[in-house]
Amino acid sequence: MPRGNEDAMENIYLRVKGIIKKDDKYLLVKRWVDDRIPDPFVWEFVDAEVNFGEAPDDAVLRAIHDLLSVEGKIEHVVYTWSNMIGDSQCVGIAYLCSMEEADEENIILSEDYGEWEWVEREKFNYYIENKYVLDDLEGVAL
């Protein structure tokens, strides 16, 4: 590694996103972000940071289990992304995932999540406020 990049490596982290599909709908969860703002919840897909030493595939399945209390299944990778957030770089992998239909009755959200809903792709922009996520989904086959 060229000299001087040691500090830069500390500012890179990896996230995974689980886009869970059932028929023609996708599971969105409403996550609490900050109680100091008028609407402290945002709609998003299941996502998580990859822990040191953890494989990204394992991380997305862990996130589904931890956030929803059900087992997920990876179908395939749908896209990757990279964003600068202040002086940090977030690199991510988005997976198309599924879960057993019977497991829907067993969904129990972790405490930071308020509710979940199956949403048609055409309605993502009514739920998801993150412009980067909406831009990443443009032209991506789900």
Image: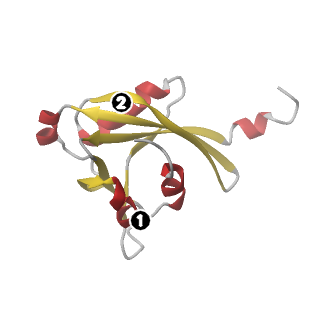
- Taking depth in this image into account, of 129 and 33 the one nearest to the observer is 129
Q: Is residue 40 above or below residue 94?
A: below
Quadrant in which residue 11 is drawn: top right
Q: Nearer the viewer, mark 2 or mark 1?
A: 2
Q: Are marks 2 and 1 in contact (CB under 8 Å)?
A: no
Image coords of residue 23 (percent x, y): 23, 41
**Residue type beneath disc 1:** Asp
Residue 108 position within the rendered picture, expressed as x and y whole percent measured from the top left: 19, 44
**Depicted 105 relative to depicted 62: above or below:** below
Type of amino acid at the residue the image marks with label 2 = Leu
Residue 112 can be seen in this image:
no
Q: Is residue 12 left or right of residue 76?
A: right
Disc 1 target residue = 34
Compared across the picture, whether 113 is left or right of 13 comes to left
Q: Residue furthest bottom?
A: 38
Residue at 48 percent across and 28 percent down: it is 56
Q: Regarding mark 2 in the picture, which secondary structure is present there?
A: helix
**Residue reaching furthest right?**
3
Residue tagged 2: 61
Q: Residues within 10 Å of mark 1 (few under 14, many from 20)?
A: few
Of residue 126 and residue 57, the one placed in the foreground of this image is 126
Name the residue located 50 percent from the left edge and 52 percent from the top edge.
138
Q: Position of residue 19 (x, y in %)?
A: 37, 42
Q: Please give left or right for residue 106 compared with residue 67 in the image.
A: left
| Marked residue nearer the N-terminal end (2 or 1) | 1
Give the CA separation, mark 2 to mark 1: 26 Å
Residue 105: name its quadrant. Answer: top left
Residue 43 x, y percent position in the rendering: 36, 58
Number of marks drawn: 2
